[in-house]
Image (cartoon, rainbow, N blue to C red):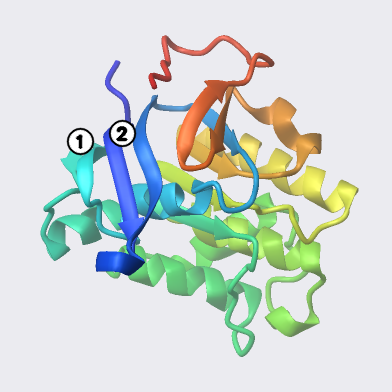
Amino acid sequence: MKPVISVCNLNHSFGQADLRKQVLFNVNLDIYPGEIVIMSGPSGSGKTTLLALVGGLRSAQEGNLTILGQEMRGASKQQLMQVRRQVGYIFQAHNLLTFLTAKQNVRMSLELHNEYLQDKDRLAIDILNAVGLGDRIDYYADSLSGGQKQRVAIARALASHPKIVLADEPTASLDKKSGRDIVEIMQRLAKEQGCTILLVTHDNRILDIADRIIHMEDGRLVEEAQEQKPVNSAILTN
């Protein structure tokens, strides 16, 4: 089985010349289809930077980064766009457009991923029902609670059936119950759709949803946590 995310000897820095600061050091990681992988580690350790590189939101500088069979370092804008269209993003700040309804926020994502897709309204409604917001479809984002906004963000990320979902602290601003509900929805829908999840979190309450837990510190993947479930020959090398 080939990994959908393959990171080999990846280094990354910010700034130039004397202001140059390296934030990732020789990162090696393979993640396989259908896995739910949680990445933990202290603030400033490089987790969000790695997530941005995997999602094609930043350009890879040194080493190799292959996402869904596409080498990201040196890839053209068109190649990067093709990868990004197969990736769903969920962030701590849900980033909903407040002047749109829940359905319109999800529909806009469908239009960006596949402008030729038929019956986008029906697909948006179906995924909002799946995250438990069937009675909030026509509510504007400003009138939703924090947990409901994050459910819309999950619906938006999963509506186009991405092959990879990247989540950065999706439960950080939620209470215990809302946070648990959010990750269980992500877990269920991802398994139903057969997609891979890479989730960054400080929230120890949700670690049990992972097939595998990896840890980053000072820009390095230093260990794989011991509390893990067996997965499909997935490996972490470092």
Q: Nearer the viewer, residue 23 or 79?
A: 23
- The residue tagged 2 is 7
Q: Residue at x 75, y 36 (%)?
A: 206
Q: Secondary structure at mark 1?
A: loop
Q: Secondary structure at mark 2?
A: strand
| Mark 2 → mark 1, Cα distance in angstroms | 12 Å
- Amino acid at the residue labelled 1: Gly
Other residues around mark 2 within 10 Å, as few (<14) / some (14–19) / many (≥20): many
Q: Residue at x 78, y 75 (%)?
A: 144
On-image quarter of the C terminus:
top left
Q: Residue at x 17, y 49 (%)?
A: 73
Q: Is residue 48 visible?
A: yes
Image position, residue 129 (x, y; %): 68, 56
Dot 2 or dot 1: first in sequence order is: 2
- The residue tagged 1 is 69
Image position, residue 207 (x, y; %): 71, 31
Image position, residue 61 (x, y; %): 22, 52
Image position, residue 209 (x, y; %): 69, 29
Q: Image quadrant of residue 173? A: bottom right
Q: Residue at x 59, y 34 (%)?
A: 38
Left or right relative to 140: residue 197: left
Left or right relative to 54: residue 106: right
On-image quarter of the N terminus:
top left
Q: Is residue 86 visible?
A: no
Residue reaching furthest to the bottom: 99
Q: Image quadrant of residue 227? A: top right
